[in-house]
Amino acid sequence: MKNNRYFVAGLFIIITTIVMIFIGFWLAFGLKDIKYDTYIARFNESVTGLNVNAAINYNGVNVGKVESINIDKQNPSVVIVVMQIQQGIPIYNTTYASLVPQGITGQVFITLSISSDPDQYIVKPQDAPPFPVVKTKPSFLTNIVNQMSTVAEQVTLISTRVAKIISDDNVQKINHIVSNVEDISNSLATSSQNIHQSIESLNIILKNAAKSSAELDQIAHNINHGSKAVARASEDVSKAITSFNNQTLQGVNNILLPQLAQTLNNINETSVQLSDLLKKMNQNPSILVRGELPRKPGPGEQ
């Protein structure tokens, strides 16, 4: 009776163990026979927290696991991670892997993302080495650390420059500049009244110029009108001169020329008479004393 109870207890333990093992396999691998393709990821950063069998997510969906983690013997700064990704999951040439921390546990998993590129194509998996390589990007924490390092360097540089700026020599120069600025502001305040007066004078000048421009327009109009009158007067004078010339020529032709011709005839006659007189004087000089003798009477005259 006692042996039967031991047999039942042992059988129960065996069955329970088998069931627990089955549940463990079911939880770990599922009931389906899943096939994987092998890919390589080369990380240039620390992979602390990443373990074998760590999950690999593709846009938040579990698509595989980490098979192995090793140091690149040719370049120790590179960590080679062998990934098992379910068959049928497309891996493009633009797909990249990055490390993502999982909560506060310190565990890390790999996430796959894809960047848009019109020239992207699917990377064909291989059954034997060399396996295709998936590109990697620095993790979020690595980016923060790098940025913090850059910020720290910039802060150090800024503090150094600030220390140079606030040196005693520069402080004196700054005080001198402030003093000059104060003097300039006082000069501007003193000159503001003169500037205001100059502006008022300029306004008066502009108003006078506006009035003068109107008067200049009237003067120009009068000059234009006067020039037209002068042109008309010059035209009348030209006509008068032409008429005077015509009348003068006509008078010369009608009056002066006949008289001149008569005068010339008289002069000719006088010259003939004077010539005869000179001949007589040459022939008989006594004519100047006695006068001319009477002419002898002709035949039949007494």
Image (cartoon, rainbow, N blue to C red):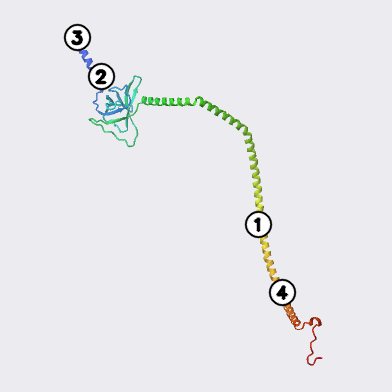
For marks 3 and 2, give the CA distance.
27 Å
User: Residue sitting at 65 percent across and 47 percent down?
Assistant: 214
Disc nearer the start of the sequence (1/2): 2
| Quarter residue 205 falls in | top right
The residue under label 2 is: 24
The residue under label 1 is: 228
The residue under label 3 is: 6
Which amino acid type is marked by label 3?
Tyr
The picture places residue 191, in percent across and down from the top left corner, at 62, 34
**Tag in front: 1 or 2:** 1
The picture places residue 19, in percent across and down from the top left corner, at 23, 17
**Tag in front: 3 or 4:** 4
For marks 3 and 4, give the CA distance.
191 Å
Q: Quadrant of the N terminus?
A: top left
Circle 3 Cα neighbour tier, 10 Å, few/some/many (<14 / 14–19 / ≥20): few
The residue under label 4 is: 260
Circle 2 Cα neighbour tier, 10 Å, few/some/many (<14 / 14–19 / ≥20): few
**Tag in front: 3 or 2:** 2
Residue 262 vs 156, above or below: the answer is below
Which amino acid type is marked by label 4?
Leu
Circle 4 Cα neighbour tier, 10 Å, few/some/many (<14 / 14–19 / ≥20): few
Disc nearer the start of the sequence (3/4): 3
For marks 4 and 2, give the CA distance.
164 Å
Disc nearer the start of the sequence (4/2): 2
The picture places residue 199, in percent across and down from the top left corner, at 63, 38
Which amino acid type is marked by label 1?
Lys
Disc nearer the start of the sequence (1/3): 3
| Quarter residue 181 falls in | top right
Q: Are marks 1 and 2 in contact (CB under 8 Å)?
A: no
Q: Which sits in the foreground, 40 or 109?
A: 40
Element type where label 3 sits in the image: helix
